[in-house]
Amino acid sequence: MNPEETSRRLNQRKADKHSRLHSSNPLSTNPHNGFPALSPAADPAVISPQDPTLLIGSSLVATCTVSPDMRLRAEDLYWTLNGRRLPAASYAALGPSTLSVALARLNGSRQQSGDNLVCHSRDGGILAGSCLYVGLPPEKPVNITCWSKNMKDLTCKWAPGTEGETFLHTNYTLKYKRRWYGQDNTCQEYHTAGTYSCHIPKDLALFTPYEIWVEASNRLGVAVSDVVMLDILDVVTTDPPSDVHVSRVGDLEDQLSVRWSSPPALKDFLFQAKYQIQYRVEDSSEWKVVDDVGNQTSCRLAGLRPGTVYFVQVRCNPFSIYGSKKAGIWSDWSNPTAASTPRSERVAGGCDPKGGEQNTTLRRELKQFFGWVKKHAYGCSNLGIKLYDQWRVWLQKSHKTRNQVLPGDKL
């Protein structure tokens, strides 16, 4: 019989037993041998202790006492744990109809519903079962972080502790209250942002600090996190910016223009905001971040590779909400938007006639100066972009002039 079927049958027996206990006398102790006595309506056998909870590494001696009606003796019995037969060397007959088994250095339960310890008759029939809950007490939850999408709700998540795994079913309860007054409140909507998370949808006050903590409990104990204090206005976030468009800047082969719309929440609640952009080339996983976008909803990316596909994302951080001095929380990045820069018109190895020494010196000085401008035009500085644009126009005109034969020139 497989472990799943054994577990199902044990659960059914427990349900039947619970029903009988409400309609007949409970089990008592046999005064002659000290083992559990069975009433006529009881199970074929009784295991003691029943459904114990133990620490990992503990030892246990369990007994199986058979009803006289079964006409079975201790030598007619054997034990299994999670469907595997236990060695006879771990058995001991403690009476004509009682067989014990010794379990040493128990490992954590293989399933949170407990390990199945079963007493069988010689022909494999199930006589009685017990669930062993072997694990660890919970650790103090850590890393509580919270955010609000609309200043009316709050979502919090946490980590279960350094180890996390207790091998037992562990309940996590998020509680909160106003700092100086009010009663404890319990969050109700769990797993909304992951396994260890909870969502408070309403009835939160602004301009009021809250105390927030998480309690972890299982069969072996309770652990309480440190208390986190926050104001809803300090943890506001928004949806990512929408309508992100990336386009070319005329024929400039090393620039792209990025435009986007502010999240609706910024308009609804009169937030101020700052933005970040990140971009990468198509064949790379490495993102470059532009930090100095400020509160603009457009930006020029410069210094890009000609003829290259770029992916661009934008995110938003609300701040100065009703005078709050703290920045909010960065939103998720927007979905990637792709665009390509124009290919360079210059042919590698093409002719580039040189002018006189004066022009050569001027070009070298301009190259050094505009090289500095280009270096500082990666962000969204308007002055840097204007200077850079002027240089690009001049450079393109210069190339065309130097590659044309003017009227009146003699060959």
Image (cartoon, grey):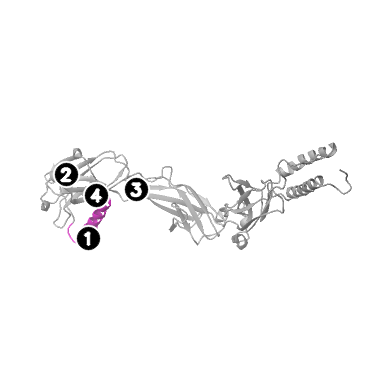
Alpha carbon separation for disc pair 1 and 2: 27 Å
Look at 42% across and 50% down and name the residue there: 215
SS for callout 3: loop
Q: Tell me the CA gap for discs 4 and 2.
A: 14 Å
Q: Which residue is mark 2?
A: 99
Q: Residue at coordinates 70% horizontally, 42% vertically from top-left?
A: 348
Which residue corresponds to mark 3?
168
Stretch of the chain drawn in magenta: 1-25
Q: Which residue ends up furthest to the bottom in the rendered image?
A: 268
Q: Amino acid at mark 3?
A: Leu
Question: Tag 1: residue type?
Answer: Ser
Q: How far, Cα to Cα, is label 1 from label 4?
A: 17 Å
Q: Earlier in the sequence, mark 1 or mark 4?
A: 1
Query: Which residue does the numbered mark 4 point to in the structure image?
Result: 130
Which numbered disc, 4 or 2, marks the residue that appears first in the sequence?
2
Q: Please indicate whether residue 129 sits to the left or right of residue 278 in the image.
A: left
Q: Nearer the viewer, residue 33 or 11?
A: 11
Q: Is residue 409 left or right of residue 144?
A: right
Secondary structure beneath dot 4 equals: strand
N-terminal-most mark, 3 or 2:
2
